[in-house]
Amino acid sequence: MDPSTSSAITLNINGEKHTLSVDHRTTLLDALRERLEMTGTKKGCDQGQCGACTVLVDGRRAVSCLQFAVAAEDRQITTIEGMAEGDELHPVQQAFLDLDGYQCGYCTPGQICSAVAVIEEHAAGWPSAVTDDVRPEAGPPPLTPEEIRERMSGNLCRCGAYTSIVQAVARAARSGRAAGPPATASAAGDTQEEKDKEAAA
Ligand code: FES
Ligand code: FES
């Protein structure tokens, strides 16, 4: 190993430490897929445009194709492989499954990682580009379909499963995984299916 071009690094992925030597130019995406055989994270454009490679780094969304593996050392990395707890799917995973939030599934790991962060960002009161009232005292805006679409806009789906993806994110947000207002107007008597349809309207 030439120390001028390579380093031994330890990555903390889904709570487990992985030590490997990498060329300094190796992206986190390639380290995950090619070196650690964690192929759940997908390579789409490899230039930060599509969101297929989205993972969480210290709980924040990151496109792993634009991050060097050496820069991810000592960070907490969560990939799609780390979302479920044993046999229990993460609520966002379950919502995608229940509501057909995918077709071919290639973009789905990135969509799910993004959605998990979106729900937490929203619950923490972060505004988006379509939030009307961005004053901190206004609190989180209603997680409308428009808000979900804007917040998920970095994740492209070539199959065009967007309608179901919005429904799935809305349902997961309502599940209580993250605090925040209901995703849609919840008139008494609405069924879950009706609410999901509203969210996609
Ligand atoms: S593969 Fe990283 S954004 Fe497309
Ligand atoms: S489900 Fe096929 S690209 Fe999104």
Image: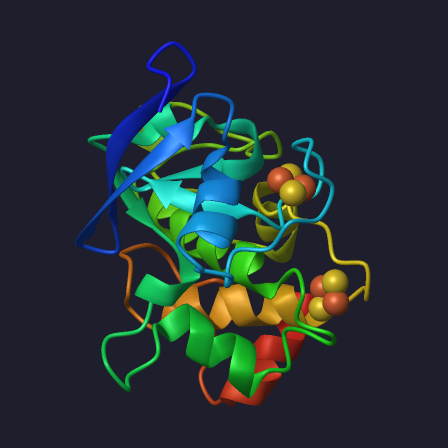
Camera-nearest residue between 51 and 167? 51
- 43 lies above or below 40: above
Q: Nearer the viewer, residue 140 or 159?
A: 159
User: Does residue 145 appear to the left or right of 72 in the view shown?
Assistant: right
Q: Point out residue 45 in the picture as x, y percentages from the top left corner.
A: 74, 41
Residue 39, image x, y percentages: 51, 61
Q: Quadrant of residue 31?
A: top left
Residue at horizontal 52%, vertical 46%?
A: 54
- State the residue at coordinates (62%, 44%): 51
On screen, residue 121 versus residue 41, left or right, reads left
105 lies above or below 44: below
Q: Is residue 50 left or right of residue 148?
A: right
Q: Residue furthest right?
A: 159
Which residue is at the front of the view, 127 or 85? 85
Residue 106 placement (x, y as % from top left): 67, 65
Q: Quadrant of the N terminus?
A: top left
Image coordinates of residue 125 in percent, x first then y, are: 34, 37
Q: Residue at x 62, y 50 (%)?
A: 52
Residue at the (48%, 62%) spot, across then down? 183
Q: Residue furthest front?
A: 1
Q: Quadrant of ligand 1?
A: top right
In the rendered image, is residue 114 in sight? Answer: no
In the rendered image, the residue lying farthest to the top is 4
Q: Is residue 83 at all visible to an observer of this figure?
A: yes
